Image (cartoon, coloured by chain):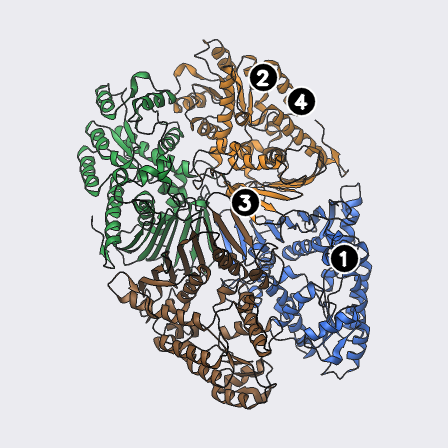
Chain colours: A green, B brown, C blue, D orange
Amino acid sequence: MAMIGGGRDAFIGAIHRIAINMDGQIDIVAGALSVNPEVAIASGHDLFLDEERIYTDYKTMLEKEAAMPKDERIDFVSIVTPNFVHFDPAIMALEKGFHVAIEKPMTFTLDEAKKLKAKVDETDLTLLLTHTYTGYPIIKQAKQMVKSGMFGKIRKIYVEYPQGWLSTFLEGSNNKQAAWRTDPKRSGIAGAMGDIGTHAFNMAEYVSGLQVTHLCANLNTVVDGRMLDDDGATFMKFNNGATGVLMATQIAAGEENCVKVRVYGEKGGLEWKQEDANTLLVRWLDKPTEIYRAGTGYVSSYASHNSRTPAGHPEGYLEAFANLYRNFTLTVRAKMNGEKPKDEWLDFPGVDDGIRGMAFIENVVASGKSDKKWTDFVV
Amino acid sequence: MAMIGGGRDAFIGAIHRIAINMDGQIDIVAGALSVNPEVAIASGHDLFLDEERIYTDYKTMLEKEAAMPKDERIDFVSIVTPNFVHFDPAIMALEKGFHVAIEKPMTFTLDEAKKLKAKVDETDLTLLLTHTYTGYPIIKQAKQMVKSGMFGKIRKIYVEYPQGWLSTFLEGSNNKQAAWRTDPKRSGIAGAMGDIGTHAFNMAEYVSGLQVTHLCANLNTVVDGRMLDDDGATFMKFNNGATGVLMATQIAAGEENCVKVRVYGEKGGLEWKQEDANTLLVRWLDKPTEIYRAGTGYVSSYASHNSRTPAGHPEGYLEAFANLYRNFTLTVRAKMNGEKPKDEWLDFPGVDDGIRGMAFIENVVASGKSDKKWTDFVV
Amino acid sequence: MAMIGGGRDAFIGAIHRIAINMDGQIDIVAGALSVNPEVAIASGHDLFLDEERIYTDYKTMLEKEAAMPKDERIDFVSIVTPNFVHFDPAIMALEKGFHVAIEKPMTFTLDEAKKLKAKVDETDLTLLLTHTYTGYPIIKQAKQMVKSGMFGKIRKIYVEYPQGWLSTFLEGSNNKQAAWRTDPKRSGIAGAMGDIGTHAFNMAEYVSGLQVTHLCANLNTVVDGRMLDDDGATFMKFNNGATGVLMATQIAAGEENCVKVRVYGEKGGLEWKQEDANTLLVRWLDKPTEIYRAGTGYVSSYASHNSRTPAGHPEGYLEAFANLYRNFTLTVRAKMNGEKPKDEWLDFPGVDDGIRGMAFIENVVASGKSDKKWTDFVV
Amino acid sequence: MAMIGGGRDAFIGAIHRIAINMDGQIDIVAGALSVNPEVAIASGHDLFLDEERIYTDYKTMLEKEAAMPKDERIDFVSIVTPNFVHFDPAIMALEKGFHVAIEKPMTFTLDEAKKLKAKVDETDLTLLLTHTYTGYPIIKQAKQMVKSGMFGKIRKIYVEYPQGWLSTFLEGSNNKQAAWRTDPKRSGIAGAMGDIGTHAFNMAEYVSGLQVTHLCANLNTVVDGRMLDDDGATFMKFNNGATGVLMATQIAAGEENCVKVRVYGEKGGLEWKQEDANTLLVRWLDKPTEIYRAGTGYVSSYASHNSRTPAGHPEGYLEAFANLYRNFTLTVRAKMNGEKPKDEWLDFPGVDDGIRGMAFIENVVASGKSDKKWTDFVV
């Protein structure tokens, strides 16, 4: 496979590579790793790429790779550039016949997202959207338990994503991550809501199996001089009548990255937080709370399939990330071999999640600006 | 002192008595413990009251006690009846010259609350409102730390109060607590928001030292047949420009009573939850989170004054409750002796908190019904 | 009842009084509160005692109270003096017909303990030994679960009691608590092992229902100049073949008072620590760990009987302490009324626990001095 | 590099490969993956090895690889076979000029360990021993803090390693892991003490920077029919006068794998447990406990160097494992390039840790059999 973006001066590209490498099933053989040619070349050397497969722009790469013999060229690309450079390379990669892995949010606008889905449908290729948190094995367990109906009808969903790293005007200093994430030209119309709110939204819909139908949002720009929202919350109505609250902030000083989701049904509910990523609390009306743990013998096949170690050997963010790539490549390989992928393999975020995510961004920003309490969630 | 309500078949009365007894500074010498005369008398015997000070209605009690010599009669009453029987006995007690302790919410309506405040002001007597959670020593520490300015300007406040005990239509079975708390005639215009939302609101304002100026609420009645809200959330704007989210629910199946408050300022923030009641997490932008613990040598005089044991001997809800009574009686006794109460003693919830609480109920219900996103918090 | 010791300058006496007062079932009507007459009298005034029942020595008190009419005199005494002043007043109280509550360790020597038991047996009076930690409701649950056999044969017991308050030579400064507890003349032959090791030992035997038969101890005096052990550990063999480890230290800098017990059987096990006093973790070989919580509907009658609030209202050390007194007084009152106490009431530590505790002190000190690995636990 | 052992039917080999792959710095190019030729070949195909570098015995592999040109042949081998097949391949690999990574315990006997050290010294090659737990970034922080002297002299060390997976006679069913680990012919003279006690011992010495001088051990075989210890504990004396307790068990039903270490000095101490692997609790005599977190800006260079993500993205067991390989390969590569490895790179367990570990096994077993309380720790 090949990477687009993710050179020496990037953050998330390195994370993708760890996830890609972890299981020894994927080789990074090409890359257009930076828009800066020098960085692109140096980064290619870092990755031990063959000289001729270190590219300085993605278009050339996609052209050249597509022209190679089938068993030599790449199978898929990973697009790990800032948001505004997702759509074009994704479309081109699909057109050239490559599967695509892409960082979230999927595109710059909802409109792009819809076009991308059309292209995916048209090409019958596979797209992975790296909503990392759904890759945790015990989150798979959570989804399966809700799906089984054991909690009865779902009534309430709380999801939160508190961070503190943007508590100061970091984009004013020499912080590349802060700079592009707070810049509407590169990040899009949302700041915190796009960067982490989308993850929270994805978790809420993924674990509950429900879809948001209405929002009532309050978005804030807390730090002086900032151009996008750095804090917000939204009430949600779901398509089964449940309600929920989503909170996402990047100005909660001292908070790290503790995504948390709670789902309550008629008979019980569950709670997960990333800080204790291998544990799922399962609560019941009339009996003791249970602590479900990843890697145990009693979890579902969806959870087991996504663990690499027995219970008690903590697996974390990087393994969750690697699960996305593993399921994606198992699926892609099965398809390439004309086999039917297992259900467990197909359980990774894709283009439909990307559309929901972009719709969330557009709808939550619109709701934030509206004087009306509730606004429809329009896709 | 004397109790009004709190007989054999009541819940919170027994809690008040434990709090009253704990420090050996208050004697329960009289009571009108139930509207049911038989229960009132039996309950009086339970408490070893003198036969002649077991009353079957509070009016008679207040009359007779007021007619007794000063050093024999009661000093104060505790009103632990359902919400709709708070105002009348409180007014009468004050008029008869007795200090008053009263369960929250303070009255049935905001209007009553204002009248009660006028009476307190007029009589110069003291009123205790039992917002228990502000009685925890480490909550005192939290308030003092915020007040000191060490976190900079406060920017964000999250407060939540999840319960699950009303997940089913409990008022349809023979559950007295559920019955009156979900009955508009006895509870007032709010259900969960009145019962526990007021506590959450009180915590937010108490710890932050700020006041809510606007609300945007979503109230729900989740359980079929229920007459009042059993779930809700509200966004809040505070008078310094901070925003917040308050969540209170009684249908979060499996949840017990874990009130939680988080406050974030420019430089750091803090977190407390009742499940770990002696611990305050203090977070900072650039250094390790600190675990402040009740009963240690490094906490403020406000925290120390409200502990009974050294660190590591868990004090809980009943001690927090007893702290309210202890500070109230220290204050009352000082006043009766013509002394100036210490600042630490004066730190208990009173009539102004009661007005804020009743205003919260009226405003949050109004906001819940409104199509407008934000509504003013009117007192 | 009356207190012996526990005047103004004492620590544990105040704790006893809170426990005594909490449920409104016991009146403190007399006291010999200090060997210092001035302190005794001032302390009596603090407690609002009648002038004539403020005594300056316990012998006079016991004489005079015994001479009073039965319905006026005290029913029992609480002995809260340092260890070396436990035995004499206890014997005298029993001889005068009073029930006895007494701080642990029960006596100064095992020999005294045996004599005290003989006196209890002879008088058929009731003795309470305040091993507080067995008063926690969820510890009652733990004991009942082990007793039920649901974990199979018990195989392993870990119990630990880490404190840090004696990390420095505190007895060299003006610290009364440190002074007597590290003084062999007042404390006995053991320091940490007597002060907190006995609690840990009591927990191990109480929860498991087993008895220690052999010890292999390592006792240390870590702080220079100290006269007794301030740190130690012992291996234990139990009478069913199980083994265990007990650790008790007062030089674990930064530790508060987190007693912890873990018991493992063939099929599962349990864990409790005082820091999270309302929670019992119940582990199983093949299914999720369960979180048992005090105050819930699913716990045993032994646990329910010892709770005062519903789940989620943390009860702590003082309530556990009060449970000892409540069960003791329920038992005493039943006996005085010629009624049979309920099993749940009888579940409080008594003279047999006191003998085991004193035997632990003598045996663990002997084992600590021995070059042999295992020494018999001799009573 | 090449693997010896770790074929399809193995456990730890797969873990090694994840650790090896993670950072994209090591290629697995050869393997003698099983003593069963069919498994060896199939396993080689699983790893996409070139046909000619799939070997069916390690001797042939080492011969052939050593005969290849320097820039084509392997640089090091990983030995992931059961304990009794560690020494021979390690010696041969070193003799052929290959660096060696090896699973713990390093050898079958202490004598072998000493010979292996002699060979390492003689060849000046590098040996990695995979004591995974010292690879955690926050454990590096712990070691550096102790080393800095900020806690004063270390006084007490508690280390524990509770597992429950051998609570039943699992070796009697078809469990390969249980079978060899409980078999003296393949595992050596110790069971639990060799398998996990060595990890605990290594942690105690690594974090404290101290060395054990004396032991007093109690080893047990709890499960009927088992041939080696499955439970035990030992007291320890350290070379600075500190004492400690080590507990390791595989029959603590319901426990997973929660290694835990606590170290206390004169002024404070620290606590880490694998269940919360990114957190270090740092306690102090007179100020709040601090929560040090991996990935933050305030940790030492040793901790930062061993993190791959910012704080709040949990890294776990596999990343800790990968850190061992990364530091080993950074060191090896530097040496091959004639450069001086950084201090942070050199911080991985090696042949000296292996000797200490084997000495622990021999000494703890001897102490367990001895009637003497304390036995010297002889190397």
Q: Are marks 2 and 1 on the same chain?
A: no
Mark number, residue D111:
4
| Image quadrant containing the C terminus of chain D | top right
- Relative side of C307 to C185, left or right: left
User: Label 2 amino acid?
Assistant: Ile
State which quadrant residue A348 falls in. Answer: top left
Q: Are marks 3 and 4 on the same chain?
A: yes
Subunit bearing disc 4: D
Q: Are marks 4 and 2 on the same chain?
A: yes
Tell me if mark 3 has few (under 14), some (14-19) or many (20+) residues whose alpha carbon lies within 10 angstroms of its own. Answer: many
| Residue at numbered disc 3 | D255
What separation in Å lies between label 3 and label 1 (alpha carbons)? 41 Å
| Residue at numbered disc 1 | C180
What separation in Å lies between label 2 and label 3 (alpha carbons)? 37 Å
Q: Secondary structure at mark 1?
A: helix
Subunit bearing disc 1: C
What separation in Å lies between label 4 and label 2 (alpha carbons)? 13 Å
- Tell me whether the residue at label 3 lies in contact with that at label 4, contact meaning CB atoms closer than 8 angstroms: no
Q: Is residue C131 above or below residue B187?
A: above
Q: Position of residue B215 (x, y in %)?
A: 32, 62
- Tell me whether the residue at label 3 lies in contact with that at label 1, contact meaning CB atoms closer than 8 angstroms: no
Closer to the camera: disc 2 or disc 1? 1
| Residue at numbered disc 2 | D91
User: Label 1 amino acid?
Assistant: Trp
User: Label 4 amino acid?
Assistant: Asp
User: Label 3 amino acid?
Assistant: Glu
Earlier sequence position, callout 3 versus callout 4: 4
